Amino acid sequence: MSGTENSRPVITSYAKAPNKRITADGITFAYRELGRQEEVPVVFFVHLAGTLDNWDPRIIDAIAQHRHVITFDQQGVGGSSGKVPDTIEQAADDAYAFITALGYDQIDVFSFSMGGMIAQDLVVKHPELVRRLVLTGTGPRGGKDMDKVVGTTYRDMLRALVTRSDPKEFLFFNRDPAGKQAGKAFVGRLKERATDRDEAIKISGFRTQLNAIAKYGRSKPSDLSVITQPTLIANGDNDRMVPSILSHDLHRRIVGSKLIIYPDSGHGGIFQYWEAFVPVAVDFLAPEPSSPGGRS
């Protein structure tokens, strides 16, 4: 780390993190980083149709108080160039190219939904790259009923259109009073960044991602016994997008993993219960005194 980097003020507010770009394998990836510089960063893997602006600042900011946080747009999404990959495997390869282009040979991972699927493929192929793994609102390759996410997504998008709501209020949260309140609060937090916002995913890219998830759900299960690093799994008890039972499945298949299921909540359980989840995530991702690997 240079003296210049040491003298820079540490940004711990996601709303103020500058947009950056780096090119890897001919693709220019858009990303943001915040928190203090360190050898092993926490890289965030976002959900279906998600961009840099789709991370809950209450979670990002809390982790950035203690860790170096990096978020990024997948190929063909938001500010990243290229074409949206039509398989989760390719998205994992893109993530590997991005991470290694930044100069890291080891990272911690925080993932949500489709991001958790990409993260699993990444760690299965490159187990030495990931030190700690957070999987939220996600499930394993070949998981039961995961291929039904397409129908669920389109139905909830239609419901949102009719009620002039954000689709995430339906997709991520229960439609009871507590869920509705949590959904609106979550969507409101996503708007806290007022400048330099990311571009929304194009319809064609969204459909490509949906089809990739369906393929992932219908494909042969991965051997998750290779995941031996500390793993935290979390979800709501009524996830309609990626059925909650699949979080239990992940827990059974990843030896030594920790599972948290939040009551009366859906796909976005960690966002509804962010006040309870944040201390757990911060503790799980606490920096270690001496971190192997680092930035080249």
Image (cartoon, grey):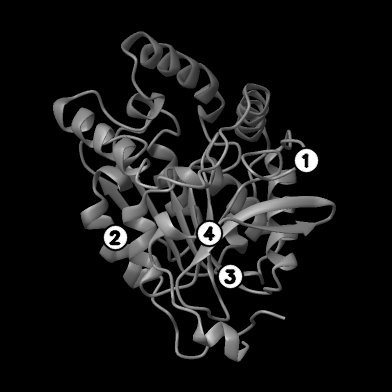
Q: Is the N terminus in the top left, top right, bottom left or bottom right quadrant?
A: bottom right
Residue lying furthest front? 195
Name the residue carrying label 2: 278
In this rendering, position of residue 116 left or right of residue 176 = right
Q: Which three-letter amino acid code belongs to the residue tagged 4?
A: Pro
Q: Which residue occupies the extreme left position in the image?
A: 177
Q: Nearer the viewer, mark 1 or mark 3?
A: 1
**In front: mark 2 or mark 4?**
4
First in sequence, mark 3 or 4: give its number.
Answer: 4
Reply above or below: 256 against 95: below
Q: Earlier in the sequence, mark 2 or mark 1?
A: 1
**What residue sits right under mark 3 in the picture?**
107
SS at mark 3 in the image: strand
Mark toward the viewer: 1 or 4: 4
Helix, strand or loop at mark 1: loop
Up/down of 91 relative to 259, above or below: above
Say what amino acid the circle numbered 2 marks: Val
Q: Rounded to the nearest whole Å, what is the CA distance between mark 1 and mark 3? A: 24 Å
> What residue did someone put label 1 on?
82
Q: Residues within 10 Å of mark 4 (few under 14, many from 20)?
A: some
> Alpha-carbon distance for marks 3 and 4?
21 Å
Residue found 31% across the figure and 44% down from its top: 189
Q: Is residue 254 left or right of residue 210?
A: left
Residue 184 placement, left or right of 117: left
Instruction: State the separation of the CA atoms marked 3 and 2.
Output: 19 Å
Q: On the rendered structure, is 105 left or right of 51?
A: right
Please tell me which residue lies in front, 11 or 117. Answer: 11
**Element carrying mark 4:** loop
Q: CA distance from mark 1 to mark 4?
A: 22 Å
Image coordinates for residue 170, horizontal then vertical, percent: 34, 24
Residue ranking furthest to the top: 162
